[in-house]
Image (cartoon, helix red, strand yellow):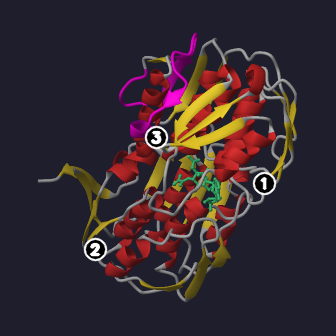
C-alpha cells in the first residue's frame, strides 16, 4: 500500500487550483439516475470515491464516459446516461466500500418507484445511521421495509404522493436523498430543518437545471413540487471548500502564503473566521482565496456545527494548525461521536492534546517532530499531513487510500507549493 513521506519545515508558497468538491460530486452523480437523458458533470475531481460511484451507477445500467481531459489536468468531464435502468438494487459489496452509495436510494425510488439498497453500517467516525433518510422518504409516502441487511423502499402506484418532514437533527445525506426522491414525486414534498450546506445548494441547482421545481434553495425549509420527468443537463461541480480550507491550514502552519484558485470565500465563512481568529491573514480575491501566515498563531475555541457553522470536516485540520498556537485552544465536535482519531497520532508528533468526551483541549507547543503515523479517516489523515509539513524531520503517513478518497492529487498540489513530499509504494 502506498504511503506519503514528508520532510517537514518548508514554507509553502504559490498558487494551486481548488478541485471540484467531493461531497458535491457524490450527490450530483446519482442525479443521472433521474433522467433518461445525458447528464454531463464538469470539474469532477479525480478521486477513488468518484470512481467507486461511477462503478456503482454502471451496475444500474448507467453508461458513463469521460471526455478527453489530459492526465496533467485537474478534474474531469463525465457524461452519464441512464436510458433504461437495468437494476434497482445496490449490493452490499459496493455500499460497504463507500458509505455515500446510500445516495442512490432517493433517485432510484423517484425514477423507478422502488429501490433496494444495502444498509451501509458504521464507519470509523461513528455509528452513522440512516434512519432520517428513511423517515423523510416515508413521510413522502414511501413504504419502507428492512430485511437481511437491506432497505427496500417502494412508492405506492409507482410515484410518491408527497408530504412534509421535519428533521430532528440536520443531516446532509438525508436531505440529499429526500430531495432526489421528491423532484419526481406526484405531489409536493416539504422539508423543514433541512441541511443547507453549499453542497446541498449545488444539488438543488443541478436539479433545477434538469427541470426540477424547488423553492427555498439555500434555506432550511425546502418545498419541492414534483414533476413528471426531468431532462439532461451540463453542470459544473462547485469548488471543494474543505480541500481549500485544508490547504489554508497547511499554508498557515508552515508560515507560508498560498493562493487557492477558484475557492469561494462566501461558502467558507466559518473556516475563514477561525483562521483569522488564529491570526492568519485571509483575503477574498477575484481569482480565489489568498491565505498568509502573519506572526505567531493564536488559540481558538469553537464547536463544529451544521452549515453555516464550523464544518466537522475541517475540525481535524484546524486542530493540526492549533497544535502550534501560542496558548490553549478548545475544540468541540458536535456532529460525530468518534472524530478524534488524529489526536493520538498528533500526540506522537509532539502535540499536547487532551480529549474529554466530545471536547479536545489543545495546548500549543513550540515544535512538532516527524513520526510514522496513520489515520482511519480522510480528514484525520489530512491533519497528519498538515502537521508533517510543519514538523522537524520525516513524517510517513500510512493508509494513503483515505487521502485518495478525498484529495485530488494531493502530493502534486503540495509539491507545487514547494513542499518536500513524495508518494512511495510500501515494501
Ligand atoms: N444522522 C442520523 N441519522 C441519519 C443520518 C444522519 O442520526 O439518518 C446523524 C449522523 O450520525 C451525524 C449527523 O446526523 O451525527 C450528521 O450526519 P449527516 O447525515 O449530515 O452526514 P452524512 O451525510 O453521512 C456528509 C458528508 C460528511 C460530512 C457530514 C457532515 C458526504 C458524502 N459526506 O455525511 O463528509 O462530515 O455530511 O457535514 O457528503 C468527509 O468528507 O470526510 C465526510 C465524512
**Viewer-proximal residue, 322 or 332?**
332
Q: Specify which label sits upstream in the sequence, 3 or 2.
A: 3
Mark 3: which secondary structure?
A: helix
C-alpha distance separating marks 2 and 1: 44 Å
List the residue tagged with mark 1: 167
Q: Secondary structure at mark 2?
A: loop
Q: Residues within 10 Å of mark 2 (few under 14, many from 20)?
A: many
Residue span colored magenta: 69-94
Within 10 Å of disc 3 (Cα), the crowding (few <14, some 14-19, many 20+) is: many
Q: Is residue 321 visible?
A: yes
Marked residue nearer the N-terminal end (2 or 1): 1
Image quadrant assignment for residue 293: bottom right
Please say if 355 is above or below 389. Answer: below
Whole-number angstrom distance, CA of label 1 to CA of label 3: 24 Å
Residue with the mark numbered 2: 370
Q: Residue at x 52, y 32 (%)?
A: 44
* Residue at point 46%, 63% (across, down): 250
Cα separation between marks 3 and 2: 36 Å
Residue under circle 3?
Answer: 95
Of circles 2 and 1, which is in front? 1
Amino acid at each position: 500500500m502506498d504511503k506519503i513521506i514528508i520532510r517537514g519545515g518548508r514554507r509553502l508558497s504559490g498558487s494551486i487550483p481548488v478541485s471540484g468538491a467531493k461531497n458535491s460530486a457524490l450527490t450530483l452523480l446519482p442525479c443521472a439516475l433521474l433522467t433518461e437523458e445525458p447528464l454531463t458533470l464538469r470539474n469532477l475531481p479525480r478521486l477513488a470515491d468518484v470512481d467507486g460511484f461511477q462503478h456503482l451507477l454502471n451496475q444500474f445500467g448507467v453508461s458513463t464516459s469521460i471526455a478527453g481531459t489530459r492526465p496533467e489536468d485537474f478534474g474531469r468531464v463525465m457524461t452519464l446516461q441512464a436510458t433504461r435502468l437495468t437494476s434497482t438494487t445496490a449490493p452490499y459489496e459496493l455500499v460497504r466500500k463507500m458509505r455515500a452509495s446510500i445516495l442512490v436510494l432517493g433517485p432510484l425510488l423517484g425514477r423507478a418507484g422502488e429501490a433496494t439498497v444495502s444498509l451501509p453500517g458504521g464507519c470509523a467516525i461513528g455509528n452513522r445511521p440512516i434512519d432520517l433518510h428513511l423517515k423523510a422518504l416515508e413521510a413522502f409516502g414511501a413504504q419502507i421495509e428492512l430485511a437481511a441487511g437491506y432497505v427496500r423502499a417502494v412508492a405506492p402506484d409507482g410515484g410518491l404522493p408527497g408530504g412534509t418532514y421535519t428533521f430532528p437533527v440536520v443531516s446532509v445525506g438525508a436531505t440529499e436523498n429526500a430531495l432526489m426522491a421528491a423532484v419526481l414525486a406526484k405531489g409536493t414534498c416539504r422539508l423543514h430543518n433541512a441541511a443547507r450546506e453549499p453542497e446541498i445548494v449545488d444539488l438543488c441547482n443541478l436539479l433545477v437545471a434538469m427541470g426540477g421545481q424547488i423553492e427555498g434553495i439555500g434555506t432550511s425549509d425546502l418545498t419541492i413540487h414534483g414533476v413528471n420527468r426531468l431532462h439532461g443537463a451540463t453542470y459544473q461541480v462547485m469548488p471543494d471548500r474543505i480541500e481549500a480550507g485544508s490547504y489554508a491550514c497547511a499554508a498557515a502552519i508552515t508560515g507560508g502564503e498560498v493562493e487557492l484558485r477558484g475557492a469561494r470565500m462566501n461558502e467558507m465563512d466559518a473556516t475563514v473566521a477561525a483562521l483569522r481568529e488564529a491570526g492568519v491573514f485571509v483575503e477574498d480575491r477575484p481569482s480565489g482565496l489568498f491565505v498568509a501566515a502573519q506572526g505567531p498563531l493564536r488559540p481558538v475555541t469553537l464547536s463544529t456545527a451544521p452549515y453555516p457553522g464550523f464544518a466537522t470536516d475541517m475540525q481535524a485540520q484546524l486542530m493540526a494548525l492549533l497544535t502550534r498556537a501560542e496558548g490553549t485552544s478548545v475544540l468541540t465536535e458536535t456532529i460525530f461521536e468518534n472524530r478524534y482519531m488524529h489526536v493520538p497520532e498528533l500526540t506522537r508528533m509532539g502535540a499536547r492534546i487532551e480529549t474529554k468526551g466530545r471536547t479536545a483541549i489543545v495546548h500549543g507547543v513550540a515544535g512538532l517532530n516527524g513520526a510514522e503515523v496513520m489515520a482511519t479517516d480522510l480528514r484525520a489523515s489530512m491533519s497528519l499531513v498538515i502537521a508533517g509539513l510543519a514538523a522537524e524531520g520525516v513524517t510517513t503517513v500510512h493508509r494513503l487510500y483515505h487521502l485518495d478518497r478525498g484529495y485530488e492529487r494531493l502530493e502534486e498540489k503540495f509539491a507545487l507549493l514547494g513542499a518536500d513530499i513524495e508518494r512511495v509504494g510500501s515494501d
